[in-house]
Image (cartoon, rainbow, N blue to C red):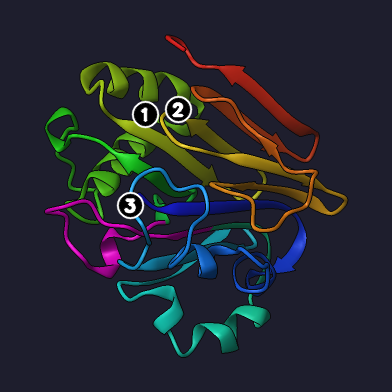
Amino acid sequence: MCRHLGWLGEPVSVASLTLEPANGLLVQSYSPRRQKHGLMNADGWGVGFFDGATPRRWRSATPMWGDASLASVAPALRSGCIVAAVRSASIGMPIEATAVAPFTDGHWLLSHNGLVDRDVLPLSAAAESTNDSALLAALIFDRGLDALGDTIVEVAAADPNARLNILAGNGSRLVATTWGDTLSVLRRPDGVVLASEPYDDDPAWEEIPDRHLVEVTPSGVQLAALKGA
């Protein structure tokens, strides 16, 4: 339920990661190849990137393929840290731009690919919307991204049916979890891509095992099994 992508490396255009690849987020919005839940992601899209230390966002509740401006502007948006997503809304969740990832606390950009019972999440005035992903993002921001693994394990214990793939960036670092859905990594000469599914058929893509914490820094990629894996 959703597809997302993160980039950390040399500055590249948003278009080069989302629109230009043969199976980029644009294609994944209507024809994902590895999505386990749902057939398409037509309930909105969001792109976040860092302008220096400041996170910037462009979000919409319309399908990515229906936005007339994205293809024109995305080639001009360049950053060394990008988080982007296309959304498949869960039943009963609002269809609005504020419900679309990436969410932010002013320092991090965060996307959630999955589903969680809202009853196990605390209400928060900091949540950008009332959907499960926005509430989960507010909880993660409140606990801090350094505690991401512990937070995911606690939420999963409260809702054993939850799917909790998180992807977040702060301009110099990406952190992610796999819990119930797919995530792959591509190490390029100019940086690292984390994505729900590969955006092309490059054999260098590696699938990350389920129930793992991933951290990407300029020093490389580190994986660690989450508690309870």
Please indicate whether residue 57 sits to the left or right of residue 38 in the image.
right
Find residue 136 and report its horizontal and vertical position in percent.
29, 39
Q: Are marks 2 and 1 in contact (CB under 8 Å)?
A: yes
Q: Which residue is mark 1?
A: 143
Task: Say which amino acid is labelled 3.
Answer: Gly
Q: Which residue is mark 2?
A: 148
Judging depth in this view, the residue of 52 and 180 nearest the camera is 180
- Circle 2 packing at 10 Å, graded few (<14), some (14-19), many (20+), is many
Rendered residue at 27%/64% (across/down): 98
Q: Which residue is mark 3?
A: 38
Q: What kind of element bears circle 2?
A: helix
Can residue 106 be seen here? no
Tell me the CA gap for discs 2 and 3. Answer: 26 Å
Q: Which residues are magenta?
A: 84-101
Judging depth in this view, the residue of 78 and 195 nearest the camera is 195
Find residue 83 and report its horizontal and vertical position in percent.
54, 56
Rendered residue at 40%/43% (across/down): 36
